[in-house]
Image (cartoon, rainbow, N blue to C red):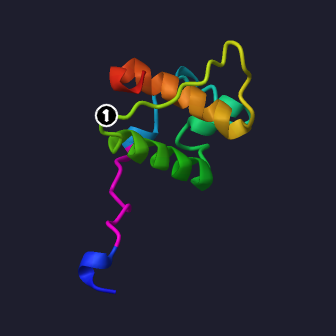
């Protein structure tokens, strides 16, 4: 394999500030035990698996170009998994900070 055949690196540096969102539960100290699902988005409660999939989501958003994300209407359809639910909360929080996430 030559240098030109190599796939571009997807191991971009993503600042923690792009992953950790300022949820009121985290900021107000309501997640000291990390037992609530929403607490899994707080920096001190977040698992490495959750951090990884949020980093991948951020990179997909960053590299989307003119593409749009398909939005699931959680008002009519419940999230299927814990990760779906966390991603929904995380994207809502990102949307409050930056309209490109909406």
Residue that appears at 36% across and 22% down: 97
Q: Which residue is mark 1?
A: 66
Q: Looking at this rendering, what residue extends furthest in the bottom direction?
A: 1
* Segment colored magenta: 7-16
Q: Looking at this rendering, what residue extends furthest in the top direction?
A: 75
Taking 102 as reference, is 63 left or right?
Answer: left
Residue that appears at 31% across and 77% down: 5
Q: Main secondary structure of the magenta part?
A: loop
Q: Does the magenta-highlighted stretch encompass residue 11?
A: yes
Above or below, 31 against 12 in this view is: above
Taking 29 as reference, is 79 left or right?
Answer: right
Quadrant occupied by the C terminus: top left
Few, some or many residues within 10 Å of mark 1 (<14, 14–19, 20+)? few
Above or below, 5 against 75 in this view is: below
Residue 69: x and y, percent?
Answer: 47, 31
Regarding residue 99, the answer to whether it shows in the image is yes
Residue that appears at 56% across and 44% down: 44
Q: Does the magenta-highlighted stretch encompass residue 8?
A: yes
């Amino acid at each position: 394999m030559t240098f030109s055949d190599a796939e571009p690196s997807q191991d971009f540096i993503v600042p923690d500030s792009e992953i950790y969102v300022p949820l009121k539960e985290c900021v107000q100290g309501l997640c000291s035990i990390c037992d609530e699902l929403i607490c899994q988005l707080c920096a001190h409660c977040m698992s490495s698996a959750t951090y990884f999939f949020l980093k991948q989501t951020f990179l997909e958003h960053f590299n989307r170009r003119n593409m749009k994300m398909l939005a699931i209407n959680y008002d009519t359809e419940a999230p299927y998994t814990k990760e779906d639910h966390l991603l929904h909360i995380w994207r809502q929080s990102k949307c409050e900070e930056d309209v490109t996430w909406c």
